Image (spheres, rainbow, N blue to C red):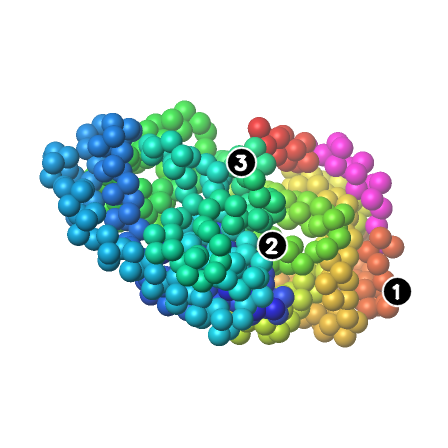
């Protein structure tokens, strides 16, 4: 299927559409994005193919003109005056800009820009013949192409703001629906532009924040994307033990509304009494403004252009990332609910693992060199690849889904083992660490079928199952032996001791490690053509442990607090 996206000339308006573009491409569909030339670079960085044939007025200037009108009408919400519409400098008087004269001098130019952009969009669409159109709320060209070619057009919201919402500070009746000053709809025999052109709307908003819609709403889960980047060095290793709050301040607010709109100091003041870690993302003049104001409050870290989806440890982050890509292809509602629950559990596991890292450092054992290798494996070797849209990306997604199924076979195997390893209690294992392991193990047993069911739902090929098992098993063996050697060589209480295979075999016989025989038997279990995870492990035992586990109780309390 050929899908054309039509986006306005501000990245924040179409960032929410990027995961949909990825999903369509991974499923084998062809996606091209109609845009202005200034959006080519951010679209390319997002992994989408830009078609820069559109034209538009600078979005910042449009916003400032709107704010100037509000100031003239007495509906400006901030102290002082808005920025100059053209220069961005702070106005000292509303008379410093002549709105009427500017509008008359630029009317024909603005209409011409809209006309040329609409004609270019229709011309491209008539040549390429898309079968589906997706556009953001500020795009006039998207619904025009849909009507002109008589193909379905979907409006994709960027958040809880829709075509029926009033424009703050604007005269009654004003909406965010784009105007058609060049009568492009009439010229292309597409009817008339208005709110009724939106028949289907993709809405990523939370249930409690959904905007009113007359159109058919298609609710989707919001997948964070705010541009490319890398995890800052200060965030590698561990996340600390406190809950995290990310304060995101966009790149346009201060430029469009002026310094009076900069609410970050008040936000930080409101968070000061909470026992949390605050990550503050600022750019440009906003970053300079906050640093010049003095030292940041305790617990606040300043970042710049940091992707917000890169904040989980490698293994669970990789699981979550792959399953978010796979979720749009799940047709079974029950399996879809299970996958969403799996994503939530893996995110909780990652936080629990992070909470252990300070405990290890307190014992004189810094695991950072080892976790860095794990990061490399999942984020580089098994991460997203620069592949052409279509079959190649779809193949890599199915390959990783199959790898997760194989990995989950062994996490469930280990979970079942640790739930029944009474020798660990007898040997005096640290009760906090043992409870954490058993909580994690119980959840692995409880959801042990989800990954395999998803693999079967999306592919299920036996050759792929065997091939990815070999990759996953080899990776796990490498990580296990590398981790064991690292921790034994660096543990200050084990001076001069080294890991050896004979010690592993002895530990299996003593009951403090899985036996080599049990590990060997797990291989033909997974490779059997009649295999299903439900054949191994006990759900009842796992649920019983989760009911009494201190770690599980703490996890449930944390989830309840976040939901509140």
Residue 169 in view, yes or no? yes
Checking the image for residue 530, the label placed there is 1
Of tags 3 and 1, the one toward the viewer is 3
Mark 3 highlights which residue? 212
The residue segment tinted magenta is 536-550
Q: How far apart are marks 2 and 1 (CA)?
A: 28 Å
Q: Residues within 10 Å of mark 1 (few under 14, many from 20)?
A: few
Is residue 266 shown left or right of residue 361? left
Of residue 23 and residue 379, the one placed in the foreground of this image is 23
Q: Residues within 10 Å of mark 2 (few under 14, many from 20)?
A: some
Q: Which residue reaches farthest top?
A: 273
Q: Label 1, secondary structure: give it.
A: loop
Dot placed on the residue nearer the N-terminal end, 2 or 1: 2
Tell me what residue is drawn at x 77 percent, y 57 percent: 453
What's the residue at 35%, 45% (across, down)? 250
Q: Which of marks 2 and 3 is nearer the N terminus?
A: 3
Q: Nearer the viewer, mark 2 or mark 1?
A: 2
Residue under numbered circle 2:
324
Would you place residue 217 above or below residue 297 in this image? below
């Amino acid at each position: 299927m050929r899908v054309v996206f039509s986006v306005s000339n501000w990245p924040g308006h179409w960032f929410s559409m990027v995961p949909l573009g990825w999903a369509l491409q991974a499923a084998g569909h062809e996606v091209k994005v109609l845009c202005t030339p200034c959006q080519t670079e951010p679209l390319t960085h997002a992994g989408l193919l830009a078609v820069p044939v559109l034209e538009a007025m600078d979005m910042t200037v449009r916003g400032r003109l709107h704010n100037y009108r509000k100031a003239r009408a007495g509906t400006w919400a901030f102290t002082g005056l808005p920025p100059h519409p053209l220069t961005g400098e702070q106005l000292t008087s509303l008379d410093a800009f002549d709105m009427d004269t500017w509008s008359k001098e630029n009317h024909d130019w603005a209409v011409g820009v809209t006309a040329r952009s609409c004609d270019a969009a229709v011309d491209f669409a008539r040549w390429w013949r898309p079968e589906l159109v997706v556009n953001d709320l500020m795009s006039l060209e998207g619904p025009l192409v849909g009507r002109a070619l008589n193909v379905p057009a979907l409006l994709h919201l960027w958040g809880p703001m829709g075509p029926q919402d009033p424009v703050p500070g604007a005269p009654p009746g004003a909406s965010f629906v784009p105007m058609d000053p060049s009568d492009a709809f009439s010229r292309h025999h597409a009817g008339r532009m208005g709110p009724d052109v939106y028949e289907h709307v993709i809405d990523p908003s939370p249930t409690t924040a959904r905007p009113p819609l007359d159109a058919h709403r298609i609710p989707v889960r919001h997948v964070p994307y705010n541009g490319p980047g890398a995890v800052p060095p200060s965030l590698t290793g561990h996340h600390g033990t406190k809950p995290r709050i990310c304060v995101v301040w966009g790149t346009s607010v201060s430029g469009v509304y002026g310094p009076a709109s900069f609410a970050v100091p008040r936000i930080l003041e409101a968070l000061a009494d909470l026992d949390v870690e605050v990550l503050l993302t600022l750019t440009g003049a906003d970053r300079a403004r906050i640093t010049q104001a003095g030292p940041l409050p305790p617990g606040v870290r300043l970042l710049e252009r940091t992707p917000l989806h890169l904040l989980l440890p490698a293994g669970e982050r990789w699981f979550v990332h792959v399953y978010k890509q796979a979720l749009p292809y799940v047709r079974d509602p029950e399996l879809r609910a299970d996958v969403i629950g799996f994503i939530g559990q893996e995110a909780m596991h990652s936080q629990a693992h992070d909470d252990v890292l300070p405990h290890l450092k307190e014992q004189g054992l810094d695991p950072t060199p080892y976790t860095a290798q794990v990061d490399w494996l999942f984020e580089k070797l098994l991460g997203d690849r620069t592949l052409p849209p279509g079959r190649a990306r779809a193949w890599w997604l199915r390959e990783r889904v199959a790898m997760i199924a194989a990995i989950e076979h062994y996490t469930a195997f280990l979970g079942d083992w640790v739930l029944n390893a009474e020798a660990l209690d007898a040997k005096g294992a640290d009760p906090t660490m043992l409870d954490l392991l058993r909580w994690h193990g119980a959840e692995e047993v409880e959801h042990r079928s989800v990954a395999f069911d998803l693999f079967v739902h999306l592919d299920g090929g036996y050759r792929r199952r065997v091939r990815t098992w070999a990759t996953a098993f080899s990776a796990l063996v490498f990580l296990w032996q590398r981790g064991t050697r690292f921790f034994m060589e660096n543990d200050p209480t084990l001076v001069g001791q080294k890991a050896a295979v004979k010690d592993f075999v002895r530990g299996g016989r003593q009951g403090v490690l899985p036996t080599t025989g049990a590990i060997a038997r797990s291989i033909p279990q997974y490779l059997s053509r009649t295999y299903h995870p439900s054949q191994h492990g006990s759900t009842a035992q796992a649920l019983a442990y989760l009911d009494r586990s201190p770690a599980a109780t703490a996890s449930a309390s944390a989830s309840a607090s976040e939901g509140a």
